[in-house]
Amino acid sequence: MNETASMSFEKIVCEDAGEMAERVAARLRDLTRAPGDQTVFIALSGGSTPRRLYELLAGPPWRDEIDWKRIEVFFGDERPVPPHHPDSNYGMAERALLSKVPVKAHRMRAEHGEAEAYEKLLGERIAARAGGVPVLDLILLGMGPDGHTASLFPDTAALRERERLVVMNEVPKLVTRRMTITFPLIQAARRVWLLVAGADKRETVRQCLEALDEPVLAKLCPAALARPTEGELVWWLDRAAAGALG
């Protein structure tokens, strides 16, 4: 990828998802231990790869090494279900991590379609702005085999959103609608980390990384558009997902 003066790009290949979780945890620790006492605003992702990270963070030694009281948690997307439902991203994160550490978290009420309320909450809680958009310190994302990230699926209306920061996105192929952050919020972030594991995503990873330099191709792979205008973009891959790229 051609790096610009305002954005750094890093591709980190790990042996497996376990090593990935350890290395991401270490970098997250460093983020919360940076000088100062400013709140660190983080958006979490759903999915099996992030869940492994959350489970790791909830136990020793990471539970005691991360400054949880300095973190405030949001979410990148949510299914239209209550938090106790097995499909809930919040519910997964709560069971794996949030209930085990002293951290403030804000769930998305996707079952009620409250996208505007969540966008307002982001604006109220986060003072830093980039072009009027709240600046998250870190957005954690996953990627599906079809190249979707958060709930920004190929050929859905949310990909074209340029004003709203959080929307309810109709996903016809899944016969559902989901709440999701949009590219304007992702582009304003200081850090965007994509965590991708599994051989079933190898071809999509290749296509998305190629599309980082090709705007026309990127439209077919939403994950390729998930990048900050300024700051840090990291693609974390296990060796199975990286394939020959590793």
Image (cartoon, rainbow, N blue to C red):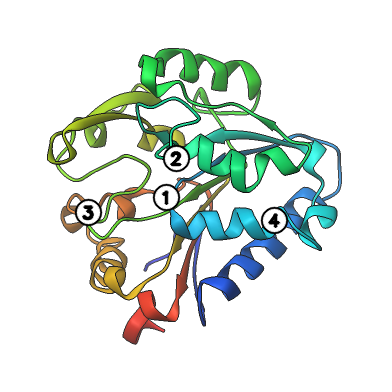
Tell me which residue sits at (66%, 40%) in the image: 98
Q: Is residue 67 left or right of residue 13?
A: right
The residue identified by callout 1 is 227
Is mark 2 in CB contact (under 8 Å) with mark 4? no
Give the number of the mark in front: 1 or 3: 1
The numbered mark, 1 or 3, whose residue comes first in the sequence reads: 3
Is mark 2 in CB contact (under 8 Å) with mark 1? yes
* Whole-number angstrom distance, CA of label 4 to CA of label 1: 25 Å
The numbered mark, 3 or 4, whose residue comes first in the sequence reads: 4
The residue identified by callout 3 is 215
User: Which numbered disc covers residue 186?
Assistant: 2
The numbered mark, 3 or 2, whose residue comes first in the sequence reads: 2
Label 4 SS: helix
* Amino acid type at mark 2: Ile
Label 2 SS: helix
* Amino acid type at mark 3: Pro
